[in-house]
Image (spheres, rainbow, N blue to C red):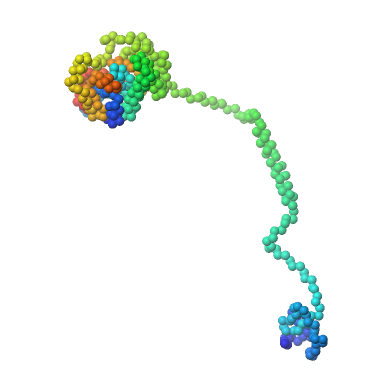
């Protein structure tokens, strides 16, 4: 297939850089079976020229530049020991005076004297609350066992047993509450007799006023 | 007396005590105002010895606590076979001294106290007069009185309680006014 060249050329030219050797336009019978066949891939021209491989040279190519954004991490150019050794040494020498001051203050046994001697404040401990003081009068140690009859208060004396029995027989053991929850017997004598019989204690209420009338108690 | 209207107080008193009341003082009615008047409670043996007392009106809880203490201490004394009067007096003297120390922070050595047989009402009145400003409240004065004179007969102490603790005048006069 013939491709017309767009510009007049003085010699044969290939747009893809092949060296074009024009032999002739005559039809030349192949000698000994034609041009030597190329084994493997046959050289071809995209424009339709016939390509004859005259030599198979290995042209060395320049090495490809490596990509800068490669994920592969490059090993450090300098050793870590060379970086950290000065840092550690500098830190040690920086902390050395601090440690020395702390040790000196810890071993210091006596405190520094104060700059100004102020008045020493020694608060006295709070006195413990004093318990109430009880006074025992001497009269208690000298008092006769049985005071004279005229000094005795007018205490309600129990009635003679005969009268008491009559009262009990007459009134029975009736109890009244007088508006409370406590049952009261008629008098302390009856209460004492009943308590003795029932092995109980007596509860005696001394009031001012009339206990039977709530207005008077 | 508000404490006696409590059902708990009523039930406890019915179970452990035989109760009676007695008028020992009076008060005056001036218009609608009552002047004077007070109350004192005594927990006694059937023989008339005062085990414990409550001076003045108290609430039901306080009354119940004191009534229980009197009964429980008496039963404990019987349990420890303290049956004679002297033994009971020594037992209750220690009990009152203990409460005086615990509740009133007042400590009295038992050996500084007089023989209970030798005390009388006049001397007990002097005892309370000397300790009016001592910081004891009414119940503390009761404990002091019954520690000095444990298990007195009621006629020995009722006047002292009413006049020297409650500051009420004992009288047989009827209620006046109204």
Q: Which residue occupies 36% across, 9% down?
A: A142
Q: Is residue B102 visible?
A: yes
Q: Position of residue A41 (x, y in %)?
A: 75, 78
Q: Is A153 left, or right, of A31 in this rendering? A: left
Q: Where the C terminus of chain A falls, by quadrant?
A: top left
Viewer-nearest residue: B78 or A106: B78
Q: Which residue occupies 32% across, 25% down?
A: B67
State the image quarter where residue A197 is shown.
top left
Number of disc labels? 0
| Residue at the extreme bottom | A26
| Residue at the extreme left | A170
Viewer-nearest residue: A192 or A131: A192
State the image quarter where residue A2 is shown.
bottom right
Q: Where the N terminus of chain A falls, by quadrant?
A: bottom right
Q: Which residue occupies 27% across, 19% down?
A: A196
Q: Position of residue B73 (x, y in %)?
A: 36, 22
Viewer-nearest residue: A39 or B6: A39
Q: Position of residue A38 (x, y in %)?
A: 78, 80
State the image quarter where residue A46 is shown.
bottom right
Q: Position of residue B121 (x, y in %)?
A: 31, 14
Q: Is residue B175 visible?
A: no
Q: Is A197 left, or right, of A92 in this rendering? A: left
Q: Is B87 left, or right, of B178 in this rendering? A: right
């Amino acid at each position: 297939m013939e491709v017309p060249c767009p510009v007049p050329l003085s010699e044969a030219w290939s747009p893809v850089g092949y060296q074009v050797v024009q032999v002739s336009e005559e039809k030349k019978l192949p000698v000994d079976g034609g041009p030597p066949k190329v084994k493997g891939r046959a050289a071809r021209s995209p424009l339709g020229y016939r390509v004859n491989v005259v030599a198979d040279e290995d042209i060395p190519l320049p090495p490809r530049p490596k990509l800068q954004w490669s994920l592969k991490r490059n090993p450090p150019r300098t050793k870590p020991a060379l970086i950290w050794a000065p840092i550690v040494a500098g830190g040690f020498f920086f902390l050395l005076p601090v440690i020395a001051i702390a040790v000196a203050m810890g071993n210091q046994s006596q405190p520094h004297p104060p700059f100004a001697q102020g008045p020493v404040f020694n608060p006295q401990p709070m006195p413990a609350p004093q318990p109430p003081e009880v006074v025992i009068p001497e009269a208690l140690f000298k008092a006769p066992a049985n005071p004279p009859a005229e000094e005795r208060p007018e205490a309600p004396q129990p009635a003679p047993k005969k009268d008491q029995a009559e009262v009990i027989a007459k009134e029975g053991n009736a109890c009244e509450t007088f508006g409370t929850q406590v049952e009261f017997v008629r008098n302390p004598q009856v209460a004492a007799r009943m308590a003795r019989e029932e092995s109980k204690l007596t509860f005696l209420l001394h009031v001012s006023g009339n206990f039977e009338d709530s207005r008077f108690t | 007396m508000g404490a006696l209207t409590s059902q708990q107080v009523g039930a406890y008193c019915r179970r452990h005590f035989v109760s009676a009341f007695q008028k020992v003082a009076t008060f005056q009615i001036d218009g609608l105002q009552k002047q004077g008047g007070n109350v004192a409670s005594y927990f006694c043996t059937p023989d008339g010895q005062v085990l414990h007392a409550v001076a003045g009106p108290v609430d039901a809880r306080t009354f119940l606590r004191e009534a229980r203490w009197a009964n429980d201490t008496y039963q404990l004394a019987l349990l420890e076979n303290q049956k004679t009067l002297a033994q009971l007096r020594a037992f209750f003297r220690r009990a009152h001294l203990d409460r005086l120390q615990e509740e009133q922070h007042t400590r009295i050595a038992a050996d500084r106290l007089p023989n209970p047989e030798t005390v009388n009402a006049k001397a007990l009145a002097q005892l309370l007069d000397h300790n009016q400003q001592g910081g004891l409240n009414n119940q503390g004065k009761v404990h002091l009185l019954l520690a000095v004179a444990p298990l007195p007969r009621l006629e020995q102490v009722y006047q002292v309680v009413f006049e020297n603790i409650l500051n009420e005048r004992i009288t047989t006069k009827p209620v006046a006014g109204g």
